[in-house]
Image (tube, rainbow, N blue to C red):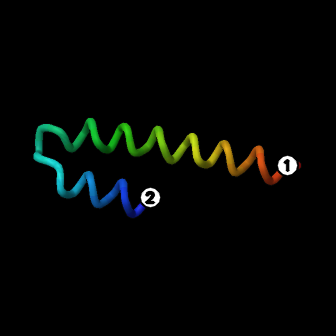
Amino acid sequence: MLYCTKNALDCPILKKLYTKTKCMETIEREFEFAERTSKK
């Protein structure tokens, strides 16, 4: 998450929204994976 946040902050203004969106998608995927793993 820190990596994503850093990328969003370093990104040019026009790309910030795109970077943030991709970051959120990655976080959601990681959260879902963690949820699935913890159920085992």
Quarter location, residue 24: top left
Q: CA distance from mark 1 to mark 2?
A: 23 Å
Q: Is residue 2 above or below residue 20?
A: below
Report the amino acid beneath label 2: Met
Residue in view at x 37 percent, y 38 percent: 22
- Residue 23 picture location, percent across and down: 39, 45
List the single residue furthest toward the right. Answer: 40
Q: Is residue 25 above or below residue 9?
A: above
User: Mark number for residue 5?
Assistant: none
Considering the numbered disc 1 on the image, is that residue within a helix, a strand or a loop?
helix
Q: Is residue 1 above or below residue 37?
A: below
- Residue 37 picture location, percent across and down: 78, 49
Mark 2: few/some/many CA within 10 Å (<14, 14-19, 20+): few
Mark 1: few/some/many CA within 10 Å (<14, 14-19, 20+): few
Residue in view at x 44 percent, y 58 percent: 1
Residue at numbered disc 2:
1
Quarter location, residue 20: top left
Residue at numbered disc 1:
39
Instruction: Decide if residue 33 is on the left or right side of residue 20.
Output: right
- Residue 30 picture location, percent across and down: 58, 47
Instruction: Decide if residue 11 is on the left or right side of residue 8.
Output: left
- Residue 34 picture location, percent across and down: 69, 51
Instruction: Tell whether label 2 touches label 1 (CB within 8 Å).
Output: no
Instruction: Decide if residue 11 is on the left or right side of residue 39.
Output: left
Residue in view at x 11 percent, y 45 percent: 13
Who comes first in sequence, dot 1 or dot 2? 2
Q: How many marks?
A: 2
Considering the numbered disc 2 on the image, is that residue within a helix, a strand or a loop?
loop
Report the amino acid beneath label 1: Lys
Residue in view at x 18 percent, y 56 percent: 10
